[in-house]
Image (cartoon, coloured by chain):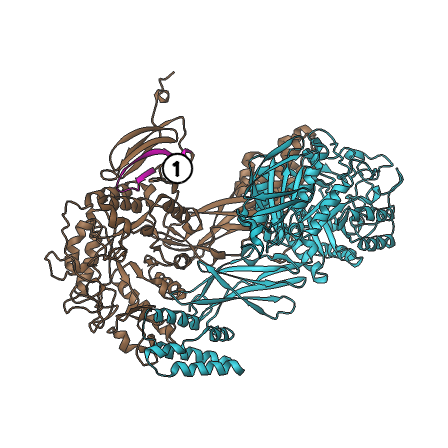
Chain colours: A brown, B cyan
Amino acid sequence: MPKEQGDGRRRVVIEGVRPQIDCGRFSIKRVVGEMVVVEADVFADGHDQVASRLLYWREDDKAVQSSPMVAIGNDRWRGEFPVLKVGKYGYTVEGWVDRFKTWHSDLIKRIDAGQDVQLEMLIGARLLEDVAARASGEDAEILRDSIRKMRDKKDKESTKDAVPDPDLLQIVERYPERTLVTRHETRLSVVVDRELARFSAWYEVFPRSCSPEPGRHGTLRDCEAMLPYIASMGFNVVYLPPIHPIGHKFRKGKNNSVSAEPDDVGSPWAIGSEEGGHTSIHPQLGTFEDFKRFVSAAAGHGLEVALDMAFQCTPDHPYVEQHREWFRERPDGTIQYAENPPKLYQDIYPLDFESAEWHALWLELKETVLFWVKLGVRIFRVDNPHTKPFSFWEWLIQEVKDQDPDVLFLAEAFTRPHVMYRLAKLGFSQSYTYFAWRNNKQELTEYFNELAQTEIQEYFRPNLWPNTPDILPEFLQVGGRPAFMIRFILAATLGASYGIYGPAFELCENAPYQPGSEEYLNSEKYEIKHRDLKSVWSLKEFITRINRTRLDHPALQSNRNLRFHNTDNSSLICYSKATDDLSNIIIVIVNLDSFHVQSGWVELDLASLGLDATHAFQVHDLLGEGRYLWQGPRNYVELAAESLPAHIFHVRRWVRTETDFDYYL
Amino acid sequence: MPKEQGDGRRRVVIEGVRPQIDCGRFSIKRVVGEMVVVEADVFADGHDQVASRLLYWREDDKAVQSSPMVAIGNDRWRGEFPVLKVGKYGYTVEGWVDRFKTWHSDLIKRIDAGQDVQLEMLIGARLLEDVAARASGEDAEILRDSIRKMRDKKDKESTKDAVPDPDLLQIVERYPERTLVTRHETRLSVVVDRELARFSAWYEVFPRSCSPEPGRHGTLRDCEAMLPYIASMGFNVVYLPPIHPIGHKFRKGKNNSVSAEPDDVGSPWAIGSEEGGHTSIHPQLGTFEDFKRFVSAAAGHGLEVALDMAFQCTPDHPYVEQHREWFRERPDGTIQYAENPPKLYQDIYPLDFESAEWHALWLELKETVLFWVKLGVRIFRVDNPHTKPFSFWEWLIQEVKDQDPDVLFLAEAFTRPHVMYRLAKLGFSQSYTYFAWRNNKQELTEYFNELAQTEIQEYFRPNLWPNTPDILPEFLQVGGRPAFMIRFILAATLGASYGIYGPAFELCENAPYQPGSEEYLNSEKYEIKHRDLKSVWSLKEFITRINRTRLDHPALQSNRNLRFHNTDNSSLICYSKATDDLSNIIIVIVNLDSFHVQSGWVELDLASLGLDATHAFQVHDLLGEGRYLWQGPRNYVELAAESLPAHIFHVRRWVRTETDFDYYL
């Protein structure tokens, strides 16, 4: 008759289990090798001591393991478990009244108060009998010996000899009672990805622009030749816009003009022609053989290939004939093209997810993904996921991960916050963010505190892009080369994952289509580019150095422990990242003003960095190679955007003084 | 195959439904006549318009009603419903894609952009056909007429005549489509109590001290004679400590001494003797006839009787013989008395809720409650609920409310925060708080912000006691009569419910048992008191005035909209309460220093009070009767604790100026 779990004598309750997303509806995310730290309020009525443990299991083998939870004050308990394999884990929390611990802690109080505890010893002996019944071997013997001692009637003084000692307590802990255990009813879960889900540097490149000869359509083989360049800068993901045949009907011309010239190449996102659809390769790019070569060459350079997954069709896409039921028909018998009124996109037919044949559509789209998985693709950058139903993505990602749990999905969800976060919850491994539009100190601080300090960090992995083929932010348009350096430093150090659209980025291309627009002038989306990668303006060396720093310093490989520190100049932003054990600490200070020298005082939260005000520490600038001896929270910095827009300090914590040496008196 | 609700075309998702306690595990609380305001994130993929509604129902008739939800920005929606009867209501949220609204809003954009919309009109006509099929009567006719117009081929200009006008839109709204509706899966609930649960002023009195003759044991009839006094001060609950027979074995003497003198009366909380237990009345207090008279006389004075419910027994309690299985036996065959080691309470046998016969025990305890319910008691003050299992209380309160939903329970849960809040969640109507130990401005502000501004307000109704028979706070011990006034004002205005242990309170009794103790010297718990209620020191008039103010001003009858305002003096605390519609606003400013005059500037958050800086407003002190014309946020106050330790301002919002008159130019 009690509401919960049958027996009215079950006294422990469990509340506030964290992490927990939407009452357990969604999983949290981790990568292999990380710990999952779980907290819960575990308590009972009255004054009895409670005990708690964390249960966890791999979803595919279900063998339940446990680890202890420890009280951290105010009835809150904490435990942790490691996730060692890619896949899904479950976890929950148990609690129970620990009768022996209660008895023992009361006993100490009684003895301290000088009370006679002979009767108490008999009560304790009873409890210990239960423990002994669960024990075996030497433990059981020691327990029974102890019981005999406790039962042995004696005077008040010598009774104390029978009080269980720490050794005995340790034995008891090995055979916990766990009767009338309360288990948190919701089974929580964690999706474990490989490390790349957390720590990645993406480089987006259009293969058709990779030709060394101006004017010629680049190929996958040309792109392959560019891999050493990309790899040398320290990237680990090379992301290709769609490589499928491009439609002809309503093809867009240069600068998105409505009518294309005969030699216009069209947008790679206008997928499908008589040459095929989502499982075909644009003939001018090459063959499947070329593609497989490309994937394997990339791997040879430590690069993974990310493909674009844009679920939309041109009017020429094979689906339009074969599966007219997957498109919406208008009253005049024509197919509804894409719109965002009053904008019209006649070159794109959206798939109709409200079609009566939605089920067949889902299955087909899954097959297209698995098609590329079979060709060795393990990362997909999903175009506009927010314009397809949430339940479709949740299903698709799960289905694909069931086949290959190593597959990762990056959501290009430039949309409203709830939609963006929902997509992350339902399974996307990483997501684009609002970073491109967060420029000043307050904007950056608020946004990254939201991402790193709230529950959002449990399921949303930001991937920061200072530019994309769609977005040339105003800051880059007007700020010159220093603006590119500033935004790159921010992306690569605020985010464990980031990406650039290159070579437009490293060459500091900054001409907008028109004032007020974020589109590139002569956008690569609609034409082939030819560039001089050896330009003296290139940020190649700068990028290489920062990617090297990211590799060398684990603090920069995770978004945990991001913390902002005060500065007295609104153009100077200061933040730190650190490993959990504080063995690696990075302090970044960026001059957000691309035009002027900025100086001011930084006020570090020393405690969060495990530093104290009485010891000097060395900060070593991994960018400019300067070394400074700092002490206390307040320290002066001066940054000239043109030459060195930031410090990326590695903290050497203990600078020794004479007192640290043995021979000091 | 989609994870949620079958059909993959169901596109709307619902998140973040509030209020919602522990994922719907517990109910929120309201009183009759209040509104339940519900918010949720309701959104779909893409750009389509969504619609949402709130569903609600009484648990006892299940007939589902609905009210619309409106978008309040950032995909958040809000709706509300009234709770008109005592009992339990359920609620949840629905959302769906509104195809007609989407079409219509797109249409306007297309027309504004000068596009040809003839085809759009045909699409709209199709949608309207579906609406017409659901409509009848005149509405259906108007709709069909409109469809005809929309289908009528015309040129671009005259097409606009067929665009649905606001009247038509209103008709469409009456027949919403609601296909592929998403319903929030968790059924949420609200427990609706009568108004007294929210707004109550309690007066605790020991009947045995009510005798007009010094030295004689008071009776229920004596206590009845005191009701006019209590009622005249404006209280509406008279709470009696346990009225049951008091045990003899190990009876405590005066000042809690271990051995009682023969004429010592014992503690009312030591329940049970050969004269009976929890369903008996102490013979010296009177008969059941007297009790019924008392309840009915109280009602005649606008007072309800609250009884104490202390589930514990003396060694003489009839249960000890009849139900030895409900007590814990020690190894020597004796019964375990109450302890909180090293403290021993030999006069009390706790009931053993871990007994194998727990089920029978639960049933018996329920019967004792229903016994008093049958005698007209509708309020119980529960002693130490935190020392009995949570599941027992949840079950008991539900069982009793199933019999009589008017019954209210006040939890005397002076315990750790999680335990206190858990008891509130599982059903207690009101709870004691930490108010007695919150004295300075920061403590009060933090604590009452926690109670009034967080989710806690949804289920935890604080009842503020400046004193109890167990607690004479140090502030009262040392601060003289002004301290009692200060603490009374705080209790009666910070809390819609509060109580005092009288007449000790109004007579400003402040002698502690010993320095550092919060026990009263010569505590009424262990002896009969005789007092002069007509003392010139009595706060009777003061209390009467404040209770009158509480009655006259609805702002003080609820804890909603409590807001603290800055002052520049840490001894001055300022807060306001207001009705939702701001028709009644009270601003309280209290001098927390019982010894000195304190003055300073108050800085009101005018916007929260619906006031603006350009209009003067009058504040009328309901305590001192002063009237002041204030303007703008900053205003000066000076309070002398001895004479007037606080202002309780009623705000008259609109002081008229010449421009408010018609004849002003």
Position of residue A195 measured from the top left corner of the image (x, y, whole percent): 33, 50
Q: Could you say which is closer to the camera, residue B547 or residue B329?
A: B547
- Residue A124 vs residue A652: left or right? right
Look at the picture and state if B552 lies above or below A139.
Answer: below
Q: In which image quadrant can residue B494 be found?
A: top right
The prevailing secondary structure element of the residues shown in magenta is strand
Q: Amino acid at mark 1?
A: Asn
Coordinates of residue B221 in the picture (x, y in percent):
87, 49
Residue A596: within the magenta?
yes
Query: Where A306 sits versus A575, above or below?
Result: below
Residue A172 position by quadrant: top right
Give the camera-side residue of B206 and A160.
B206
Residue A435 forms part of the magenta stretch: no
Q: Which residue is mark 1?
A: A566
Work out whether residue B136 can be spotted.
no
Q: Is residue B131 above or below residue B589?
A: below
Crowding at label 1, few (<14), some or many (≥20) Cα neighbours within 10 Å? some
Count the marks. Answer: 1
What residue occupies the far left of the structure in this picture? Answer: A213
Looking at the rendered structure, the secondary structure element under dot 1 is strand
* Residue A264 figure quarter: bottom left
Q: Residue furthest top?
A: A665
Residue range of the region highlighted in magenta in the rendering: A586-606
